[in-house]
Amino acid sequence: MRKLKYDTTLEIHSKNLISNLNYFRSQLLPTTKIMGMVKAYGYGLGPFGVAKLLEENGVNYLGVANILEGVELRKVGIKLPIMIMKPELESFDLIIEHKLSPVIFSFYSFRSLLKALKKHPKKIDSFQINIKIDTGMHRLGFSPNEIPDLLLALKKAPQIKVEGVFSHLAASDEKNHDDFTKLQIIRFKEVISEMEKTIHYRFDKHILNSNGALRFPDAQFDMVRLGIGLYGFVSESKHTKHIKNVAVLKTKIAQLKTIPKGDSIGYGRKGKATKQLTIATVPLGYADGISRRIGNGNWKVKLHNKFAPTVGSVCMDMCMIDVTGIECKEDDEIYFFYNQDSTKQLSSVLQTIPYEILSSISPRVKRVFI
């Protein structure tokens, strides 16, 4: 399969990703650790290549969503600590086996871990966990009023050691919610203060994500978690000029057709030739992560520095482009997105965010690290 020359590729520009990492480093204290988020198939860029790149460039920790993502990273030789944000409660044995770091976010998850440790064939005298605090996101995490009971549960389980305590900001990229973000940080500090009265050893504290790291540097604590910022997107203009584009989605023309006036193009005959058209069919469809909503002229791709609209409905594996008047030939490259602006524009057309654009790209699209 390594010999297969793919027509459709997602190019990942490694130097730009590392440049983004180093820009964040320049905004942090030298002692602040960095967790690189590689969940959701590495934000769509390919978890193995991204994880290896981050490991080679001094990131302290990796973060994934579930146990499968963590195990797959271990299988390709990643040695960094890996935090599992939402471990499957009935599969803690895999966390133990592959030396992963689970997030404990409720008393039920805590009891599930204790049960797995008791069942493990080898006696484990010490096991590290990370604790998530809900400071206002209201997704996962212990509420501040649950902390006394949590500390009591930890005291009764001396084999459990707290590696880190963290929370998640709900709106760190939106200035109109800055008062709420500051309130979350205050709540987090209060919880940390309460926990440190009982836990007499050092543990990592962190609450900032990419935009939080740039906008609220006074709340760095011990570590920041970088996701979308590494991959090319931050909210404030004073920082965007320093953040480089990482991902380019491109494909090649499979066939050119001349369509007579009056004929239709694609499923449901949605595309109409109001004049003679030249149509390029490309091997990229909704099974590759391209929304059907970009069909019927709702998106323009880049071809030889010109822009050509989609025509007709996006198919499962292909879509059609109106290249009338553009000099091109079969096997020429077409770019669906190629810089931050084009990805943001595509996000706007689909009424979503760049996170979804990147993470929706199917694993069958070849990732190529440039």
Image (tube, helix red, strand yellow):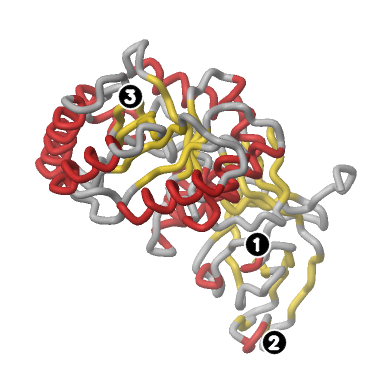
Distance from label 1 to label 2 (Cα)? Answer: 27 Å
Q: Is residue 176 visible?
A: no
Given the image, on which type of amino acid does mark 2 rest? Asp
Please indicate whether residue 241 sits to the left or right of residue 343 in the image: left
Helix, strand or loop under label 1: helix
Pointer 1 residue: 288
Pointer 3 residue: 203
Q: Nearer the viewer, mark 1 or mark 2?
A: 1
Rendering coords of residue 315 (x, y %): 66, 74
Q: Nearer the viewer, mark 1 or mark 3?
A: 3
Ranked by sequence position, the earlier of labels 1 and 3 is 3
Pointer 2 residue: 263
Q: Is residue 312 visible?
A: yes
Asked if marks 1 and 2 touch (Cβ < 8 Å), the reply is no
Distance from label 1 to label 3 (Cα)? Answer: 42 Å
Q: Is residue 57 above or below residue 153?
A: above
Helix, strand or loop under label 3: loop
Residue at image x 46%, y 51%? 115
Which is more toward the observer, 327 or 74?
Answer: 74
Residue at image x 69%, y 44%? 367
Residue at image x 46%, y 33%? 127
Q: In the image as oriented, which residue stretches furthest toward the right?
A: 3
Image mark for residue 48: none
